[in-house]
Image (spheres, rainbow, N blue to C red):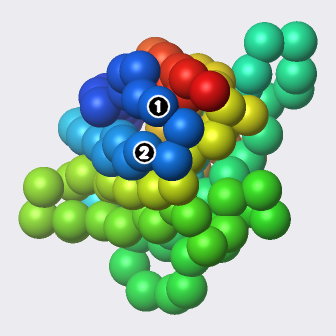
Amino acid sequence: QVQLVESGGGLVPAGGSLRLSCAASGRTFSLYRMGWFRQAPGKERELIAWLKRTIGSPYYADSVKGRFTISRDNAKNTVYLQMNSLKPEDTAIYYCAADLDSSVWDYWGQGTQVTVSS
């Protein structure tokens, strides 16, 4: 089993920045990739970025490309999401997720609220 705990959400004005962290514990050696989703009120959950645990280029959704950066620190079993130039439409609950073999996201964090004021 793998446990994921997010932190770093909060309230920020438009144009500001936040960094989310996701600490993984448990059988982290078995993970294939880690990523970030978000879900705004009344909308479906959206995959916005993911990164393989070892090598490879990150994936970004068009909605965040150029503004958000995903990174990892394998020594700390932590993945980060640096969010810059935040917009009110980025307001959502952000979830960290991890999978074992790229077919389905197996593990989820509890979510952290990000609110961007206009």
Q: Is residue 101 visible?
A: no
Please determine whether, in this image, residue 66 is positioned above or below residue 49.
below
Please determine whether, in this image, residue 56 is positioned above or below residue 98.
below
Question: On the picture, is 61 further left or further right than 72?
Answer: right
Question: On the picture, is 15 further left or further right than 75?
Answer: right
Question: On the picture, is 50 further left or further right than 84?
Answer: right
Crowding at mark 2 (Cα within 10 Å: few <14, some 14-19, many 20+): some
Looking at the image, the residue that sits furthest to the left is 75
Mark 1–mark 2 Cα distance, whole angstroms, equals 6 Å
In this orientation, which residue lies closer to the viewer: 91 or 98?
A: 91
Question: On the picture, is 113 further left or further right than 54?
Answer: right
Crowding at mark 1 (Cα within 10 Å: few <14, some 14-19, many 20+): some
Please determine whether, in this image, residue 17 is positioned above or below residue 68.
above
Q: Which residue is mark 1?
A: 13
Q: Is residue 89 visible?
A: yes
Asked if marks 1 and 2 touch (Cβ < 8 Å), the reply is yes
Query: Which quarter of the rendering shows the C terminus?
Result: top right
In this orientation, which residue lies closer to the viewer: 30 or 77?
A: 77
The answer to which image quadrant residue 79 occupies is: bottom left
Q: Looking at the picture, which amino acid does disc 2 mark?
A: Gly
The answer to which image quadrant residue 1 occupies is: top left
What's the residue at 31%, 65% (across, down)? 72
Q: Which residue is mark 2?
A: 16
